[in-house]
Structures are given as C-alpha cells and as structure tokens.
Amino acid sequence: MKRQALWFPIEEYEARVQRARELMAKKGIDILFLTGDRNYLYFTGHRPLTPEGWAARPNYFVLPLEGDANLIVHLFLEGDVRSSSWVENLSTYSSLLEAPIKELAAIFRHYKTKRKRIGAELGQEQRIGMPIRDFLGLREELREFEFVDAAPLLWEMRAIKSPNELICIRRAMDITARGFMEGFPLVRSGMTEKEIACVLGSKMVEHGAETFWTVIASGKENKERISGKPTDRKVAPGDMVWVDMGAMVNDYWADYARSGVVGGPSPDQKHYYEIIVEATTEGVAAVKAGVPGSTIIDICEKALHDRGLDISFHAGRLGHGVGLFFVEPPSIAKWDPVILAENMVITIEPGLVREDGIYHAEENVLVTKDGYEILSNAPRKLWTLG
C-alpha cells in the first residue's frame, strides 16, 4: 500500500529514532516499548484517534537499540497504519478483550539485548496506553527482562521542538489568536460560558483548527474554577470572563489566556490586569537558552511583591511546556531543575485570583539562543465584551 504524506518527512522520524537510541545507550535501555498515544504518534507518524474517544485497540511500538522497529496494531487499524507510518515491520491482532502478550513477548525475545532492560512510560506525566492487567501480564511473561522508566528519555526528546513541529505550533498559536480576536467581539451579556466557548471555538475551527480546548471562568461564582470546563452560568454586566484555550493543528497545541469584562472593566480591574501583564512581561523578558526555569519564578514573584501582591493562581507551577500536549514538561517551577534550551516552547503565567476576577495573561514563548519569541499573539488587553 502506498504511504501517504500525512505527517512529517521520513527524515524527521529517522532523526528521532537516532536520538532515542543515543539516549537509550546512555541510560542503559535495550528496548523502548511505547503504548501511550502521544509517544506512539511521535515515533511512528501514525495519527491515532485521541484516547478520549475509546480505550479499545491499543497500539504497540517497539524500538530496539539495535535492529528494526516493530508495530503491533489491531486489525481494524491496519490499513490506516500501513498508509501513514514509516515502520515496515507491522503485525496485527484481533482480540478486543486482551493484549497480544505472546506476540509482543516474541518480538522482545527476538532482539539481541545486553542488559535485558525495557524502557516504558512509567514516570512523570506519562501513561501507558494498555490496560494495567495486560501490562502486568506482559511483565510476568517477560520475567527475564526488567521494565524501567523511560519518561526522562521521552521528555528530553520531546521538550526540544524540531522545525516541522514549530510550524504546527505556530499555526495553532495564530488560529488561537483569531479565536480571541474574532470571538470576543461576539460575546454578549446573557450568554452562558458554554455558548461563549462555542463562539470562540467555532472561530478557531473556521481558521483551520482540527479541534480545540477551552477553560472559562466568569463572575464571582466561578472565580475559583481555574481548571474547569465551561458551565451553564450566564454572564452579566461587570463579570470578568477569563478564557484559557488553544487550537490544535496536526496534533500540536496552543495554550494561552485572555480576558474581558462584560460592559467594560472597572478601574480596579484595569489596574490589577495591568499589574499581571507587567509581571508576565518581566518573566518573559528573562527567557533565554541557558537560563534556569526557577529564575523566571523569582522574577515574576518579585514583580508582584514589589507591587504588594502575591501569586494566587495556584497551578503547582508558573509555566510548562507546550507540544503534543497543551500542558507537558518541562515545568517552570522551583522544584524543576530545568535549564531552558533553544527550541523549547514554554508558558509564562503568574496570576491573581480576586473577588472581581481571574487576572492571568498567559504567554506561550519560544526559547531562542539569544532570547525569546512570543508566539501567543492575541492582543494583551482586557477586552470590553458586549
């Protein structure tokens, strides 16, 4: 079957495999075993349906330190995989009740291994994409092997974006900006949060988003819902409407926030919004390859302390990576020792949660060799909503 140009050029995947093998050798991993759909996509080029829709038919990607990679997918997916993945060694299974444990074990035992160590998605912000029962069954079958955490290897690779990945991310950022710029002027008093999400989302889809996500909080009743889906609450004059959202393009995301006030902001709302924009701007200005992520925290905290305020938008970190997830490592947090590197895409997002609204002007930033580039290009203002 002829392969389609559905994803990146073959050279992209060859480079990923080469880099993975370099890290596998360094970390003493003989075989990489990936079932989580984002890692599977990253290495194989096949774009599976997102896990929110189904948990049946897991995909299994096996990459040895030496030898050819292998894919095992459900028979239902064979045609799509053969037409879109670079991996030549493809086998199928048919059961919807259990994993092809014997078949997987045979593949692992086929490879020559020095340490008999299999790297799997066991650690930070990783999920295996097969039932735990089946994973435990595979581990029991392969008692001569040791399963170890491959999360550090995977995040070391995925944190640095390639030129092809950045094309997708830039497009997602631009589409998200259109969602804000064309959607906010259509918001009216009496709309529900769900209706506002539909208005903004429809604008993103209109401009090419494959899908989108939104978090909305409005008014005093919902001001604490900094991670909540839109509700049936109707917005009214004086309500601040905080929206954190992003478009997805070719499985790559945007993630940034803008706000508006129904009927226009009060002097206090303008004041505190200006403060949070200033603090965010100071944090962004410090971004550069070689800078510790914790430095950004210190700068943002100082910017607010100098104005008599403390961060009250408690997300567990002041920023994060953006890529195949709209929230992924590295974390911009004092507990994460990350050193910023060229072509990381991160967020900077100090925030205040007050009685009159959520003050949070999240920016998405590309780390460059000598500084930064802001990718989240929707206007940085407190909008007046109709």
Image (spheres, rainbow, N blue to C red):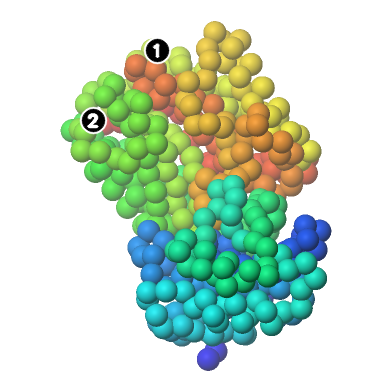
Give the residue type that dot 1 points to.
Asp
Residue 357, located in which quarter of the rendered image? top left
Residue that appears at 38% across and 70% down: 56
As drawn, the residue found furthest toward the bottom would be 1
- Residue placed most toward the observer, 378 or 295: 295
In the image, is residue 222 above or below residue 374? above
Count of number-bearing discs: 2
Residue 145, located in which quarter of the rendered image? bottom right
Kindly identify which numbered label has been placed on residue 214.
Answer: none
> How far from the left and from the top, in percent, is residue 243?
38, 36
In the image, is residue 84 above or below residue 287? below
Residue that appears at 76% across and 78% down: 112
Residue matched to label 2: 235
In the image, is residue 7 above or below residue 154? below
Label 2 sits on a secondary structure element that is loop
> How far from the left and from the top, in percent, is residue 272?
46, 16
Residue 181 appears left or right of 282 = left
Residue 193 appears left or right of 339 = left
Q: Earlier in the sequence, mark 2 or mark 1?
A: 2
Label 1 sits on a secondary structure element that is helix
Say few, some or many: other residues with alpha carbon within 10 Å of mark 2 (under 14 / 14 to 19 / 20 or more). many
Residue that appears at 38% across and 12% down: 267
Give the residue type that dot 2 points to.
Val
In the image, is residue 112 above or below residue 309? below
- Residue placed most toward the observer, 28 or 105: 105
> How far from the left and from the top, in percent, is residue 189?
21, 31
Say few, some or many: other residues with alpha carbon within 10 Å of mark 1 (under 14 / 14 to 19 / 20 or more). few
Kindly identify which numbered label has been placed on residue 268.
Answer: 1
Residue 119 appears left or right of 381 = right
